[in-house]
Image (cartoon, rainbow, N blue to C red):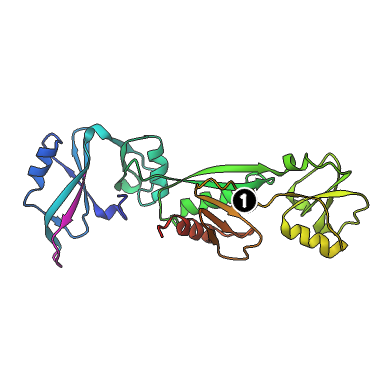
């Protein structure tokens, strides 16, 4: 029920108590502007939200043929916050999360008004590896949500896998990491594949399948490995989740409840992946 645009919401001040009977009496026989799909009715501090259906036609004002009360004052919280972009679904979801179980009407940026229903918030898990911190994927997700490119009222939940903790499980005299710029360290001797090191002792690779293939190509042999690919580390628990993986070169892939973007993903690719993951089949 989240309106597509605040233009679809008409705010109307009334002089009667916002009961179902009074609202029906007010709407009966009235016409509504062609863009209007919802009313936010205000009586003093009380607020109600109503969805309307208009007769077919091309006129600027058309008869209201039916209505549905979405929320009466006992179930509505009014938030006045000029920093909130009410056209941005994720911005609305962030506000609504602080009002669990309530329909939230927001008067926000430019005095625009919209609303979000309590069952519309979508929680999206975002799994990434660190260091570096903050995780790249968390930064990209925040930028995608702020940009308005994501079409759903998403509230992200960030999960981090600390690769230094994984490296603590290395039992060999040395550890091999994919990249020196990663910030990964070890209490043991550390090598970095991007530096083409001369690995002179028994070592364990903390890396993904691609890193293992690079190692085999360089050294013509296999090496014990600790998995670090977010796609492989992601729990298969049925929750919608976003990860990155170097096997995806551009764009995104959807595998059941998993959206996968490239290791070097852009904000647009992240937004497209989220939209694809959350769009009903």
Q: Residue furthest bottom?
A: 58
The residue lying toward the viewer, choosing from 7 and 65, is 65
Please give the range of residues in magenta.
50-59
* Quadrant including the C terminus: bottom left
User: Residue 1: horizontal and vertical position, in percent?
Assistant: 30, 49
Q: SS at mark 1?
A: helix
Residue plotted at (19% across, 33% down): 44
User: Residue 23: horizontal and vertical position, in percent?
Assistant: 12, 41
User: Residue 251: horizontal and vertical position, in percent?
Assistant: 56, 65
The residue lying toward the viewer, choosing from 24 and 255, is 255
Residue plotted at (17% across, 45% down): 12
Task: Report if residue 84 is visible in the image.
Answer: no
**Quarter location, residue 160:** top right
Does residue 48 appear to the left or right of 184 in the view shown?
left
Q: Which residue is mark 1?
A: 136
User: Residue 31: horizontal and vertical position, in percent?
Assistant: 10, 55
Residue plotted at (7% across, 48% down): 28
Number of disc labels: 1
Does residue 26 appear to the left or right of 12 in the view shown?
left
The residue lying toward the viewer, choosing from 183 and 238, is 238
Does residue 10 appear to the left or right of 190 in the view shown?
left
Task: Report if residue 229 is visible in the image.
Answer: yes
195 vs 74: above or below = below
Does residue 211 appear to the left or right of 105 in the view shown?
right
> Label 1: how many residues lie within 10 Å, few (<14), some (14-19) or many (20+)?
some
| Magenta span includes 225 | no
């Amino acid at each position: 029920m989240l309106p597509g645009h605040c233009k679809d919401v008409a705010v109307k001040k009334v002089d009667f108590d916002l009961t179902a009977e009074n609202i029906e009496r007010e709407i009966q026989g009235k016409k509504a502007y062609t863009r209007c799909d919802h009313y936010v009715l205000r009586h003093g501090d009380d607020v109600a939200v109503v969805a309307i259906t208009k007769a077919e036609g091309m006129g600027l004002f058309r008869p209201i043929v039916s209505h549905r009360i979405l929320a009466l004052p006992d179930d509505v919280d009014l938030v006045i916050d000029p920093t909130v972009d009410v056209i941005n679904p994720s911005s609305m979801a962030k506000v609504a999360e602080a009002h669990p179980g309530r329909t939230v009407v927001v008067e926000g940026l430019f005095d625009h008004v919209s609303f979000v229903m309590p069952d519309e918030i979508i929680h999206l898990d975002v799994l990434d590896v660190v260091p570096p911190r903050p995780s790249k994927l968390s930064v990209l997700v925040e930028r995608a949500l702020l940009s308005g490119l994501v079409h759903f009222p998403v509230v992200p939940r960030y999960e981090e896998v600390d690769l230094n903790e994984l490296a603590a499980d290395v039992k060999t005299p040395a550890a091999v990491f994919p990249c020196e710029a990663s910030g990964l360290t070890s209490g043991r001797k550390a090598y970095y594949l991007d530096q083409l090191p001369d690995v002179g002792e028994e070592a364990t690779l903390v890396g993904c399948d691609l890193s293992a293939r690079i190692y085999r190509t360089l050294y013509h042999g296999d090496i014990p490995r600790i998995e670090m690919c977010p796609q492989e580390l992601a729990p298969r628990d049925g929750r919608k989740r976003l990860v990155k993986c170097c096997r995806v070169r551009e764009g995104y892939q959807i595998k059941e409840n998993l959206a996968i973007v490239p290791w070097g993903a852009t904000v647009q690719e992240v937004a497209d992946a989220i939209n694809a993951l959350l769009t009903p089949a």
